[in-house]
Image: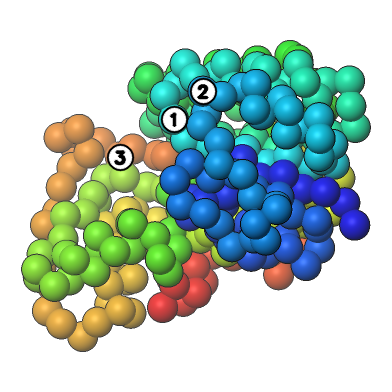
Amino acid sequence: MKKLLIFGASGLVGKALVEECKDSFDVYGTYATRPVDLPQEKQFQLEVSDTDQMKDMVKALRPDAIISCLRGEFDQQLEFHRELSLEIRNTESTLYYFSTANVFDGDFTKHHTEEDTPNAASPYGKFKIGCEKMLQELLLEQAVMIRIPQIWGKKSPRLDQLKSGIEEGTIDVYSNLVCNHLTDELLAKQLKYIILHHLKGVFHLGAIDMMTQAQFVEELVGNLTNKDVTFHDCLLEDKPETFHFGLKSIRNDLPERLVKTNRALISDLV
């Protein structure tokens, strides 16, 4: 059984990956403060600043696949991934790096595909572009970029916040933000498929259709409760124009069972 090492296994996505992959891989994971659902000998407490411990771990485990869904200060993350790349570049390991739709937040005129050149305005988007470029330069095909939109889950902070809004009876929504979404569970299934089938390059994962953020939230709330909730219509950046912030894919690698619409994701959440 091939070894899979997950950096950031205690987060929302990391937990879903552990659950989905533990029957198909020999899974190891790291956490910052909260231990993960793995045998004690297969989990390690690791700070993003501790690159020496990371390198010792990689040398000892010699994983076939590494998933990075780390969080932390941008400079520390960049250094972590640089040292990780140098450690594995002459090995058989493949790195699956979680990036974001924010690499395109400098251009809201259209939804973006894997062929589009990243263009970011936010510090977060610029950091992710820098990390993507560095990994691709050092690792070439050993680095696989996984760009994702907003992630929802049954135990996600995003859903908890929505439920709090239901209790309070009012929720802010954006009618001029058009985008797609993804759940932690579907993301884990998609990435497991990508790893098992040795797929390479850049992937845009997310629902195959687009909705306004307002429409997605209102439909999700309607499926969660019969309470009367007031939706406060907001405009992103207080501008009337439409902001296109979806990740479209021109790839056809994933099977039909792993491709879903926004409404199907809503059904999964409730």
Q: Secondary structure at mark 1?
A: loop
Q: In the rendered image of this protein, does residue 211 appear above or below residue 81?
A: below
Mark closer to the observer (3, 2): 2
| Mark earlier in primary sequence (1, 3) | 1
**Local crowd at mark 2 within 10 Å, few (<14), some, or many (≥20)?**
some
Decide which of 228, 270 is in the foreground and name it. Answer: 270
Quote the CA–CA distance across marks 3 and 2.
Answer: 40 Å
Quote the CA–CA distance across marks 1 and 2.
Answer: 9 Å
* Residue 221 seen by the camera: yes
Decide which of 84, 56 is in the foreground and name it. Answer: 56
Q: Secondary structure at mark 2?
A: loop
239 to the left or right of 138: left
Q: Amino acid at mark 3?
A: Thr
Q: In the rendered image of this protein, does residue 141 appear above or below residue 69?
A: above
Q: Position of residue 58 (x, y in %)?
A: 76, 32
Q: To which residue does mark 2 refer? A: 49
Q: Position of residue 250 (x, y in %)?
A: 69, 43
Tell me the residue at 70%/52% (across/down): 42
Quadrant of the rendered image containing residue 5: top right
Quote the CA–CA distance across marks 1 and 3.
Answer: 32 Å
Q: To which residue does mark 3 refer? A: 242
Image disc number at residue 72:
1
Decide which of 146, 89 is in the foreground and name it. Answer: 89
Q: Are marks 1 and 2 in contact (CB under 8 Å)?
A: yes
- Quarter of the figure that contains the C terminus: bottom left
- Quarter of the figure that contains the N terminus: bottom right
| Mark earlier in primary sequence (1, 2) | 2
Tell me the residue at 80%/56% (across/down): 26
Decide which of 127, 202 is in the foreground and name it. Answer: 127
68 to the left or right of 1: left
Q: Amino acid at mark 1?
A: Gly
